[in-house]
Every structure is written in C-alpha cells, then in structure tokens.
Amino acid sequence: MTTFDRQALPLLDLSRFRRPGRAAFLAELRAAAHDVGFFYVVGHGVSGELARGIFAAAKEFFALPVEQRLAIENVRSPQFRGYTRTGHERTGGAPDWREQIDIGPEREPVAGSGPAWQRLIGPNQWPETLPALRETALAWQAEALRVSREVLRALAAALGQDEEYFDAWFDEEANTHLKIVRYPGRQSAEQEQGVGAHKDYGYLALLHQDEVGGLQVQASDGGWIDAAPVPGSFVVNIGEMLEIATQGYLTATRHRVVSPPAGTERFSVPFFLGPRLDAVVEPLVLPPELAAEAKGVSQDPDNPLHAAFGENALIGWLRSHPKVAQRWWSDVLADRQR
C-alpha cells in the first residue's frame, strides 16, 4: 500500500459513473482501491427512509428480551444464520464485543452429496415477535446488493475490463451476507476489541454505520485511521477475492472496530458481496501499466487465501463460530484434523 492521507479515507460520488466524462471518476476509484482499499461512497441512490428504517429495526430487535433473541440463536442453524450473543464470534482467536444477526439469501438447503460448502446454502431465522424485521432486512439487502454490484462494475471499468466482467459469478445464486450489529459500550478501558483486525474474504464489503465511530483502517505504516461516520455515505472496502483476481493490484486492507466508550452503543449494518459458492477466482488480464504495479497476493500463514470461494467462505465461518461448527460441522472438523 502506498502512503495516503492519515486523516480521512477517499470519498467518491458513485453517480459520476453513469455521467458523461466519467474517466476522472474511474481514475479516482482506481487509486482509492489500489492505494487504500477503503473509501466512502455517496450518490448511491439508497433512500434515507430505508437507511433510517434498518437502524430502527435493529434497535427494536436488540431491545427484545434475551430469551426472544435467543429463539433465533445461530447455534440452531447449520448455515450460521441468526442471532449471536456478545462475545460468541471470534476474530484473530479472541472474542468480539458485539451482538448481531447474520442474514443470507433465502434459499432451501441443498440435498445430496457434494462439496462441504454446499451446506452453507439454506434459510434465515427470523424473530416471530418482530415480523417487520424480515421485510426491512431483505429490502436493505437488495439495495446493498445493487450498490455493491454498481461499485464492482465501476471497478471492472477502472481496471480496463468490460463493465460486466464479474457479472457471471453474481447471478441469483450469489452468496451475499448481511450483518445487523450492536456494539455495547466497553466494560473496561482495556476491553477495546469490538471486532479484531482482519480482512474480508469476499469481493466487496459495504458498511452502513451510525454516528458513533469505531471502524479503523490499517495504514501502510501499521497505524490506524479512523473511518469516521460521514452522513449519507457508505464505507466500501476491497475483499480478498478481488486481491486474488487482480494479483494484488487491488488491496484487501486489514481493519478493526474499537468498542464504544462505556454507556454508549454503536449500530452498524455491513453487507458482504460474495459470488456463487462454486466460483473459482481466475486472475484477470490487467493493462500493462496496471500489471506493472500489482504487488502480488499477500501471504499470511494464519490466513491462507483460496481461489475457490466456497472453501474460503467455509473456513471463515468455521473459525469464527466454533459452537456452530461443533454442533453442525463436526464431520468436516474431524476431516481437517486428519
């Protein structure tokens, strides 16, 4: 990663992608995705009513009595869907100080033999006492998918490809993932891990955050940049699959969330754009001037990357939710220990 402004992430107006003379926008997007791997997006067309509505639904859910939240606890779901209690998801081997709902595409489970990752396909869990959550969350998921795919098309154009280059892997079987998250205030000054430092393994992530800060992006010198909330914007970041596809020209950047102060809570709704689970990422052919700046795919012995998306996704779920893995995936865990 090259050096960049330690005070703020780039801010881009996505509506410029569909305007005449978009070359300047594509150059700015390419630089942001290459140098930083994180940027704000405005001009996305998502209504303020829906943006407020998803936070209202989140606050209603997390205000429910704990037994009603636990009625859809994710240990009931082989697909890792549903509610996760504070401290029950792990990043970097340590518990994250957040509670959340995990939501994916509404599908029937896949029957028969096949690769283990096929078992990630299935239905969501919804609280019976809050039926409006389903409608709002799925409406938000659809809009987040629309915006994310527009960013991906713009990135394809910025990399010298046809806009539709990535579309084949993002049909009705695409493996998208939505989280609705509440970060409670920290219990002690030392307890700052809202989410531990990590990279996202899909193509793109799109974050809707409230006015309480906490997201931080790692700079090239190892320091941390605050991704301060910008009204009306989403934060977008590059995932590991795009780093693989571009041989490291695009940057999947480590990031974390610092817990809010005691007595404060933070709400966020991250959306992760993943392709079909059977997708295998193949390097695209970059223009020579861009290929010369590709840094190669980063190698982390604690986080090996797989070009097969389904395998990469399954590894992430098994590592992050050990209780779900032990209940529903014991055969896969046993095979991996042999």
Image (spheres, rainbow, N blue to C red):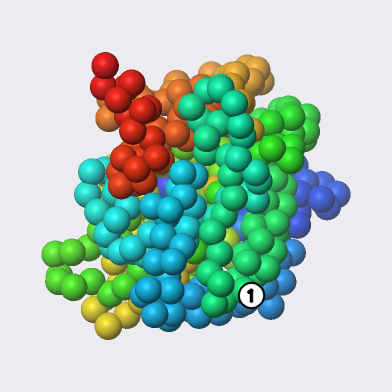
Which of the two residues, 100 or 30, is positioned nearer the viewer here? 100
Q: Which residue is mark 1?
A: 132
Q: Residue at x 44, y 34 (%)?
A: 314
**Residue 41 placement: quadrant:** bottom right
The C terminus - image quarter: top left
Residue 331 in view in this figure = yes
| Left or right for 215, reference 232 | left
Residue closest to the far front: 112
Q: What is the number of callouts on the image?
A: 1
**Residue 286 placement: quadrant:** top right
- Residue 149: x %, y % from top left: 70, 45
- Residue 199: x %, y % from top left: 40, 41
- Residue 269: x %, y % from top left: 51, 63
Q: Amino acid at mark 1?
A: Ala
Which of the two residues, 176 or 285, is positioned nearer the viewer here? 176
Query: Is residue 34 placed above or below 18 in the rendered structure?
Result: above
The residue tagged with tag 1: helix, strand or loop? Answer: helix
Q: Residue at x 41, y 60 (%)?
A: 73
Q: Residue at x 43, y 81 (%)?
A: 63
| Left or right for 122, reference 73 | right
| Left or right for 320, reference 118 | left
Which of the two residues, 297 or 166, is positioned nearer the viewer here? 166
